[in-house]
Image (tube, grey):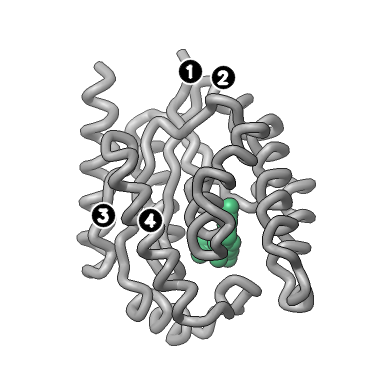
Amino acid sequence: MRGHFITFEGGEGSGKTSVIEYLKDYFTDLGHNVVVTREPGGIEIAEQIRDIILSKENTAMDELTEAYLFAASRRQHLVERVIPELEKGSMVLCDRFVDSSIVYQGYARGIGMGKVFDINKVVIGDFMPDLTLFFDVKPEIGLKRIMDNSRNMNRLDLEKVNFHGKVYDGYIKLMEKYPSRIKAVNAERDIEEVKLETIKIVEDFLNDLK
Ligand code: TYD
């Protein structure tokens, strides 16, 4: 049986990465074969592309170049990692996927959501996540979190506050477009509550398949 492809989306500082690790342990204990991966990256070639995209040196990067590099990284990760795992029946938990490009490059950078989706259709075809969780955190709160954690900031983190506001608005628009696939999690709360809500959404999704 084909596995499940579940993706995690949100702005900076949404806490999704730690929740993904928690979900991995939870569903592994229940007997699932769980694979955690991320975009851009997840495998060697895609990690190399990631370094180019996120390097703070690359301030001259054109927005379409950026969109195509994300798509190239996505293609390699999909064929080398995601699809083979799904064919083995794994539950693949992926930190970001095509929705990030539609929102960051399409909406926040202004290329156009439809245009970026079209660029990505070339690399993903009809392949879409089975379920997407949007970690809903207002940009002011998310950005404060990453400053407080003194995380190493990458080229996209360093964008102006206005850009992160657009990212948030872009996700809201996308959720309105795909209400059955994308579920919002209120991620402004305590991390333990966020974990519980996320598990409930994934469990409901799995139960609906039965
Ligand atoms: P990362 O450090 O992985 O961020 P996060 O922990 O927030 O997921 O950096 C990835 C950055 O790349 C993040 O700012 C979102 C951005 N991004 C895009 O702009 N487009 C994309 O298609 C993807 C996958 C990520």
Mark 4 or 2: in front is 4
Instruction: Mark 3 and mark 4 in contact? Answer it, CB < 8 Å.
Output: no
Mark 3 or 1: in front is 3
Disc on res. 2? 1
SS at badge 3? strand
Q: Is mark 4 within 8 Å of ligand 1?
A: no
- The image quadrant of residue 143 is bottom left
Closer to the N terminus: mark 2 or mark 3?
2
Q: Amino acid at mark 2?
A: Glu
Residue that label 2 marks? 87
Disc on res. 30? none
Residue reaching furthest to the top: 1
Residue 125's spot in the image, x, y percent? 60, 26
Closer to the N terminus: mark 2 or mark 1?
1
Mark 3 or 4: in front is 4
Q: Amino acid at mark 3?
A: Val
Disc on res. 171? 4
SS at badge 2? helix
Residue that label 3 marks? 185
How much space separates mark 4 and mark 1, taking CA atoms?
28 Å
Q: Amino acid at mark 1?
A: Arg
Residue 209's spot in the image, x, y percent? 28, 20
* Picture layout, residue 109 above or below residue 5: below
Question: Image check: 116 left or right of 133?
Answer: right
Mark 4 or 1: in front is 4
**Residue occupying the point 21% across, 51% down:** 197
Instruction: Mark 4 and mark 2 in contact? Answer it, CB < 8 Å.
Output: no
Closer to the N terminus: mark 4 or mark 2?
2
Residue 155's spot in the image, x, y percent? 65, 74
In the foreground, 5 or 162? 162
